[in-house]
Image (cartoon, rainbow, N blue to C red):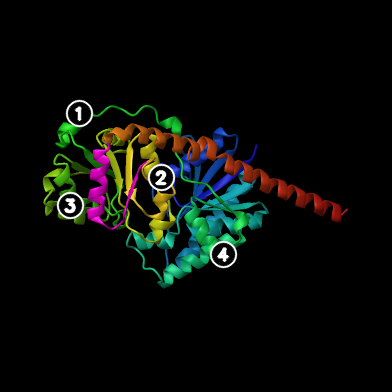
């Protein structure tokens, strides 16, 4: 049985899009006959034992906390994580090291894999320098931005194989001059076994929130600037002019929380906009039940044009209607008018018009829901997608066996 050691920035029991994708990958590999374990770097912030089991998955922790001036701090992180990988590998003896972005994990995994003489796979979920720009913690073209990109380029160049989550990221790497033949796609996916028939509307919760009968436009997630929630709030007066009972339900929180609440209070549609704050993961399904249309008004940027988000897929898997901005990451997931609706980014008037038109076409919603589920099952179900990893592992291990055999012959 193949053993794969996965190198991670952070993991369960923390909850994030990153940890949920990791969980889906590892669980699906387990179900497919691959033994898996994970190692997190020093940025995993949850307290816990040195070896922690979460949801039936084993994670090794790297001791210590990041310290020192920029660059030196990151080099220390890489060295500490490399030591932990090599120590774990000596005990567990993995066949493959599979590192997931950021490039700090990739470089530690690459160095350890070369020292151990085993294949190395690197997986990119987003370019972290672009993500930093998107969430307001970085600046495009800065020294840190360039250094992060240079480090990732080095990892990609030296890896035995590379996965990206979408065509946008793969195309960008190829444009940089990387070998297209070794870059494969492992798209965002969902575990369809977790999604049965969606629950009925939670009328008691609707009453507590005071949202009435709707139609309800909703967003559930983190409030970052690039998500474009300010454009969605700005669209509400025009939407209400066509559908006077329309409501906006915003579930979650984040850096833009205060600014968005202030904007909503000053809106002509203030009485139709409800913020819930963050809710426990176990209760999210109840909030989904209140929403007629899940809206994802991401602003246009390198991040949103290159990266496919997970949330529209989760919404489609739950038979929800999806409307999203027409940026590259959404176009890879949503076919306009078939599996959802696309509208121009950064344009509140266009958002209002598209949402109003979608509400006017309620008779098409059932077909749209069905098309969304079919699309997710065919292209984004982890039970199917995981074969991409197994096939690559087998290929790399077969390559290694051939190389070992040749060496034996040459030295006979």
Q: Check residue 346 for magenta coloring.
A: yes
Query: Residue beneath label 3, please?
Result: 261
Of label 2 and label 3, which has the lower sequence position? Answer: 3
Task: Looking at the image, tell me whether mark 4 or mark 3 is earlier in sequence order.
Answer: 4
Report which residue position mark 2 lands on.
335
Magenta span contains residue 397? no
Secondary element type, mark 1: helix
Can you tell which of label 2 and label 3 is closer to the viewer? 2
Residue 367, picture quadrant: top left
Residue 281 percent coordinates (x, y): 32, 38
| Number of marks drawn | 4
Earlier sequence position, callout 1 versus callout 3? 1
Q: Are marks 1 and 4 in contact (CB under 8 Å)?
A: no
Nearest to N terminus: mark 2 or mark 1: 1
Residue at x-position 59% and y-position 52%: 121
Indicate left or right for 344 with 115 as reference: left
Residue 154 tag number? 4
Please provide the residue range marked out in magenta.
340-361
Q: Position of residue 106 (x, y in %)?
A: 53, 57
Please tell me whether mark 1 or mark 4 is closer to you in this view: 1
Circle 4 Cα neighbour tier, 10 Å, few/some/many (<14 / 14–19 / ≥20): some
Q: How far apart are marks 1 and 3 (CA)?
A: 25 Å
Would you say residue 170 is visible in this rendering? Answer: yes
Counting from the top left corner in percent of width and height, residue 44 is at 42, 51
288 over 84 or under it: above or below: above
């Amino acid at each position: 049985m193949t053993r794969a050691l996965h190198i991670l920035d952070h993991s369960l029991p923390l909850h994030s899009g990153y940890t949920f994708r990791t969980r889906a990958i590892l669980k699906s590999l387990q179900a497919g006959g691959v033994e898996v374990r994970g190692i997190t770097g020093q940025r995993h912030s949850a307290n816990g034992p040195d070896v922690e089991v979460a949801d039936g998955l084993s994670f090794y922790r790297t001791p210590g906390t990041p310290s020192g001036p920029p660059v030196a701090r990151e080099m220390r992180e890489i060295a500490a994580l490399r030591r932990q990988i090599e120590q774990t590998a000596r005990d567990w003896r993995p066949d493959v090291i599979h590192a997931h972005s950021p490039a700090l994990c990739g470089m530690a995994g690459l160095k350890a894999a070369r020292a151990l003489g085993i294949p190395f796979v690197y997986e990119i979920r987003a370019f972290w320098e672009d993500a930093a720009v998107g969430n307001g913690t970085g600046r495009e073209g800065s020294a840190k931005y360039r250094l992060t990109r240079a480090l990732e380029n080095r990892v990609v160049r030296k890896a035995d194989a590379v996965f990206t989550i979408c065509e946008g990221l793969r195309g960008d790497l190829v444009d940089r001059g990387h070998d297209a033949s070794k870059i494969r796609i492992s798209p965002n996916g969902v575990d369809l076994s977790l999604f049965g028939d969606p629950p009925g509307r939670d009328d008691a919760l609707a009453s507590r929130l005071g949202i009435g009968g709707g139609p309800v436009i909703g967003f559930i997630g983190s409030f970052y600037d690039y998500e474009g929630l300010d454009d969605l709030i700005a669209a509400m007066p025009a939407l209400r002019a066509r559908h006077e009972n329309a409501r906006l339900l915003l579930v979650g929180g984040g850096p833009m929380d205060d600014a968005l609440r202030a904007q909503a209070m000053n809106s002509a549609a203030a009485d139709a906009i409800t913020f819930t704050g963050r809710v426990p993961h176990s209760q999210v399904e109840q909030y989904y039940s209140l929403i007629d249309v899940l809206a994802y008004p991401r602003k246009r940027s390198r991040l949103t044009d290159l990266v496919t988000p997970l949330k529209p897929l989760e919404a489609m898997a739950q038979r929800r209607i999806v409307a999203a901005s027409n940026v590259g990451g959404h176009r890879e997931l949503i076919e306009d008018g078939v599996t959802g609706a696309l509208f121009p980014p950064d344009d509140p008037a266009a958002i209002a018009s598209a949402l109003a038109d979608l509400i006017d076409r309620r008779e098409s919603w059932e077909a749209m829901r069905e098309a969304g589920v079919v699309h997710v099952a065919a292209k984004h179900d982890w039970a199917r997608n995981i074969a991409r990893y197994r096939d690559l592992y087998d290929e790399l291990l077969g390559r290694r066996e051939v190389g070992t055999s040749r060496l034996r012959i040459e030295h006979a």
